[in-house]
Image (cartoon, helix red, strand yellow):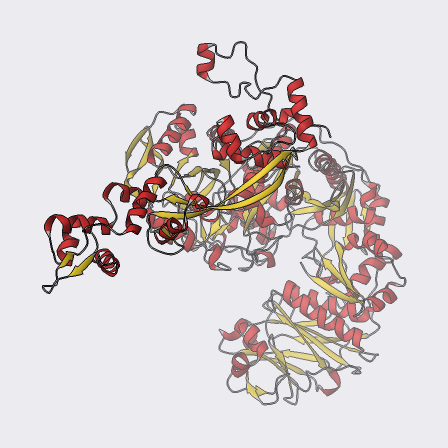
Amino acid sequence: MPKIEVLTETFYRDLGQKYTDEQLEEILPSAKAELDGRDDEAGVLKIELNDTNRPDLWSSAGLVRQLKTITGNEIPFYNFFSNEEEEFECAERIVEVDPKLENIRPFIAAFAVTGKAVNEAVLKDIIQTQEKLCWNFGRKRRSIAMGVYRNDLITYPVQYRAADPDAVRFVPLQMEQELSLRQINEQHPKGKEFGHIVAGFPLFPFLDDANGQVLSYPPVINSADIGAVQEGDSELFIELTGTVHDDVLLAASIVACDLADSGFTILPVKIVYPYDTDYGREVVTPYYFQKPAAAELTYVHKLLGYELSPDQAVKALKRMGIFSVCDEGMLYAVVPEYRNDFLHPVDVIEDIMIGHGMKNFSPIMPDSFTFGRITREEEFARKVKDIMIGLGFQEMMYNYLGSRKNFITRMNTEGAEYIQIANPMTENYEFVRASVIPSLVESESVSGNAVYPHKIFEVGKTAFLDAEDNSGTVTRNILGFLAADTAIGFNEISSTISAILFYLNRDYMLKELEDTRFIAGRCAAVYVGNTRAGLFGELHPVVLENWGIQMPTAAGELDLDLLLSNT
Amino acid sequence: MDIDVKSLHPLEIKVLLHVQAGEQLTSEKIQTELGYKLGQCNQAFSWLSAKQLIEETSRVTRIQYELTGLGKSVIEIGFPGERMFKLLQEHGALPLPRIAEILGLDKSDIGSAFGKLSKQGVFGMTAEKQAELRKKVLPRDLILARELVLRGADGPVENESLTEEEREVIQSISKKRGAAGAPFRVVEREDIIYTLTSAGIEAAAVLRAKQITGEELGTVTQEMLASGSWKNKTFRSYSLNAPPSRVLLGRRNPYAEYLQWVKDKLVSLGFEEFDGPLVETEFWNGDALFMPQFHSARDIHDVYYVKEPAYAREIPQPYLDQVAAAHEDGWKTGSRGWGYEFDRDFTRRQVMRSQGTVLSAKQLPKAEIPGKYFGIARCFRYDQVDATHGADFYQTEGIVLGEDVNLRTLLGLLKMFAEEVAGAEEVKYVPGYFPFTEPSIEVHIKHPVLGWFELGGSGIFRPEVTQALGIDVPVLAWGLGIDRMALMHLGLNDLRDLFTPDIESVRMRRGK
């Protein structure tokens, strides 16, 4: 979930009033936001945004817009959006797209801003917007990347083209020498981070102007001149490239609205595609592409459990910055330019809920009668635990992930049945336990100072490979137990097994077992009927030595699922 | 001073009753007059001193010589010098190695005995390098040494009882620290003289008044019961507050007990438990929950992937087709969907279950309406393990299905959990976000100990989730963060402690 920092002073100035932390915590939930902390020295508030489908909130300007709407009850208005029917004049501001980009990174949206010098707060917010949008919403620049440039240095039309990564060279930001696009991937920190996104294509995306002056190599890095924006610049060119047209358009709309809110004038740019898009071959951006959302009022009532009048519903949406009308029981909402999170009528209903105010919905108890019950496995597990406690065992609980060293190597086994994690964070959590015994043995190894005898058990899950299953694995409920003392051996554990199975009312038989974890001839497989339901034995001194255990130790386990199905 | 004579041991009682005020009390006196063993005596004195019933008046250190194991064998077979003397008397001159052989002694022992006695003129060496006898009697020190070991056999030899000459001899055959074996060892003994304190005199008076003799019966034995020997005797009162010895018992793990309490609570509220495997597919772990396959939470750095088998063989139909369609264009759910091409290979990719909601989704196709279900599910997250993050941990999740459930019944449900499970004093609802619910609500509670915190997340399952899994009624979904309450309940503040392997810490752990 994105976290943003806003300059406290700018934030409250834009909001039009100062709030105490308590007041802020009252209004932030309407944007699904929480105050995460503050740094008074730097003069910033840290705010966490919970809704991953609301990238419009991930900037100071965007958050202010939402909060002002709900407190001031005014729907924001933007006059620079083109749409299907109406197109703004762009004069020379044109971006021409290379046909070869269609299968590489086909979409671009752009606009210029003017009317005000860029100050520190604006620059900081633009950079933050760029980061959050491209990282969280743009999947680490894979689907959206954004560039900001000095508009006064650009000669239109701008060319968005597919370039030869070895032939095309320019000086990237943060460097002094010219590098080819491929060299940027290899040498520049941003190239190393983002170059992989396009590295698999024969040609890379590239932006330059009518004079061949380089803007950038999207989605990686800007050029060091046109692409180096500073405080005091008063004309900016902003572009966003990506793989999903709606996402690129939405992200551009969000940035444009943020800058308009900060007092800039937005100058639209015409994108000319050589191929068809959902919105034609010529798209003037910022572009309003959203379709109205609708919800039947009866559905609103059903889901919220509350009969709002049409007027109440329209007013609730207005508080969320959404214009709507109600016609013959159907609520039509005009989706704001900076949002695209209305997939289903339920999404409209949630905005109605927030706009109407959580406080205005009183809880009622669900009144349908249902049976409560635990699973058969849980019922059985409780019975087993009772027996173990009667036998003097202490119940333990363990992590299910562990290392090869603990689960396999130290246990003196091959571990062929163990499920391995493909992307472990560390080797400490690389395998799923296929047996409870290593967990119990680890306990013994760290508990040499605890008063003896040690008698411990766990009823928990194990999972292991099993080709029969659709997943190639099975999960089982297992009883594992261990005893360690000066005179613990096969006979003591055999008595334990006998007592457990007597009270579980299962007849059993012991058969010879070959298992390198145990001393040969002092371990056994436990059969219930024809099913092998468990094993036990004296742990081999090799295992004890591997774990640094100096007390005779015996252990065993029983598959409770098998016992349960074998009555 | 208030004297609790019940706390006195018979060993103490008999001592108190035996000595008079002002009389000198020594270990020797008690051993001879009351027949105590030295250990019993020491115990009685140490307990009485601790209770300030007797006090030390003087302390004298004396030295004793105690016979060692070697000393005892010397009595039987003699000192090496004595034995050599006897052998040479019988056989005449013999070479030293031969003597060692016959007597079964080390050459070095023979050598040193020969050297010492030669100096005293008892032995000499012939021209043929044979040891011979030059005197007819043993030297005086060897005779004295024999007398001393014989005295040692009757008990420690007091240093005070020895003549100057004897003392010299005994020291020469006593073991010193670090030296090899010798017939005697030197022991320092402390003679402590005690007298009764005024409290001791008082205690003795109370004992006499209560007719406590120290001969009362202690442990009830089988013999006592069989023979009836207890009749006409009294039983000694035991000290009630003496620290009892530790019992090791079989016991539940308090965290497991807490989870069971939560389960029972939910069962009592009409919820049925569900469960499922630890290994899941992307289909159930995310797709069925309408999380787009490119969602940031489904990144490789959030979920643990299973290495082998990387893919499940198949995903059950018709759910696969319906879920895929819901993602692509909304299917018939009234949604426009996510508008991307659903990846049917990716959906079979196997992961370690990362959220308990998986079980809620899997329950939908087999759920009854109305129905209430819950599970406490072990989940796995790609997270740095620390005090607030575990590699695997429990999540408590559930669903409520019904024609008439809605936002307000969801709020009611949350209120019920807040009060019944968390013991909350106040409840606050705020809008939340979860990919699979809309609307989504977080419930914050004011806990009597923990203050305000987020108890859980909830919402109404999106129709893209429910309808694709065959359910046409609203479904409330909820999850409770009970770990925080569990930690508080157990007096812990580190999640890792919930699964500690340390036996002693689990043994000592108690719930609140």
Looking at the rendering, in which quadrant would you find the C terminus of chain B? top right
Location of residue B319 in the rendering, given as x and y in whole percent from the top left corner: 52, 43
* As drawn, A474 above or below B195: below
Location of residue B483 in the rendering, given as x and y in whole percent from the top left corner: 63, 44
Between A211 and A178, the one lying in front of the other is A178
Regarding residue A70, the answer to whether it shows in the image is no
Horizontal side of B85 relative to B462 (left or right) equals left
Horizontal side of B122 relative to B413 (left or right) equals left
Number of numbered discs:
0
Regarding residue A356, the answer to whether it shows in the image is yes
Between A277 and A125, the one lying in front of the other is A125
Between A565 and A379, the one lying in front of the other is A379
Extreme right residue here? A17
Location of residue A343 in the rendering, given as x and y in whole percent from the top left corner: 67, 52
Looking at the rendering, in which quadrant would you find the N terminus of chain B? top right
Extreme front residue here? B136
Location of residue A20 in the rendering, given as x and y in whole percent from the top left corner: 87, 57
Horizontal side of B32 relative to A552 (left or right) equals right
